[in-house]
Amino acid sequence: MPGKLKLSALDADDLGVVSAAVQDALVAVRDCAYFKDENRFVLLLNRFQWEADPGVDSAYSRTHSALVFNEVTVVRHHNIPLGEADRMLELLAVTLESDRSVVVRFAAGRAIQLEIGRLACHLGDVGEPWPTPWKPAHPVE
């Protein structure tokens, strides 16, 4: 199994790497939190470990991770079922839309937009990974 992943993003290129690492992560609505007094937005993820080599490792794996955005001034939800705390969201991508806006996109047309003072994002694995027989797949169009 690979070691714990720790990444930081300070520009669009860095965020592209973070986005690839969190693609297909699962997150419960309850695990998306804005700490307004700290200007921090946190998502606790069930992350597929894309960086693992299935030829070396015995199985695909997932791990718990924290995706943190600092210097967040405003959070906007689009089609997020805030009243359904247990609803699971499937993370598709994280993009820098402008110098002052990050969008976290989920399946089913859901999104969270973060207005930021500057990009200061961190991804870190927490806990130990576990094997999974399922590898996320996407239809080719």
Image (tube, grey):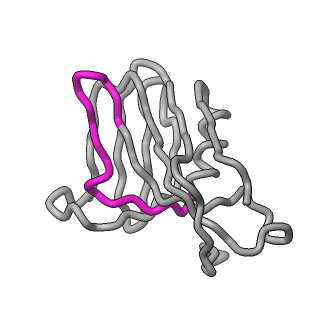
Q: Is residue 136 left or right of residue 97?
A: right
Task: Give the image location of residue 103, x and y in percent.
Answer: 43, 43
Q: Is residue 11 one of those drawn in magenta?
A: no
Residue 88 % position (x, y): 34, 66
Q: Kindly indicate the quadrant of the structure image that contains residue 76.
A: top left
* Rendered residue at 19%/56% (across/down): 82
Where residue 16 appears, as percent x and y from the top left, is 63, 42
Q: Is residue 12 left or right of residue 34?
A: right
For the residue pair 46 and 128, the one nearer the viewer reads as: 128
From this viewpoint, which residue is outermost toward the front?
A: 128
Identity of the residue drawn at 60% across and 75% down? 132
The answer, for residue 50, to whether it is visible in the render is yes
Q: Which residue is depicted at the point 50% across and 55% down?
A: 64
Residue 42 sits in quarter: top left
Inspect this view and state whether residue 138 appears.
no
Task: Please tell me whether residue 28 belongs to the stretch shown in magenta.
Answer: yes
Total numbered circles: 0
Which of the two residues, 82 or 35, is positioned nearer the viewer here? 35
Q: Which residues are magenta?
A: 23-41
Q: Residue furthest right?
A: 55
**In the displayed image of the protein, which residue is found farthest to the top?**
117
Image quadrant containing the N terminus: bottom right
**Quadrant containing the C terminus in the rendered view:** bottom right
Q: Residue at x 58, y 47 (%)?
A: 19
Q: Quarter-wise, where is residue 23 in the image?
A: bottom right
How far across and down, in percent of the image, does residue 84 sit? 19, 64
Residue 28 placement, left or right of 47: left
Q: Residue furthest bottom?
A: 133
Front residue of 52/81: it is: 52
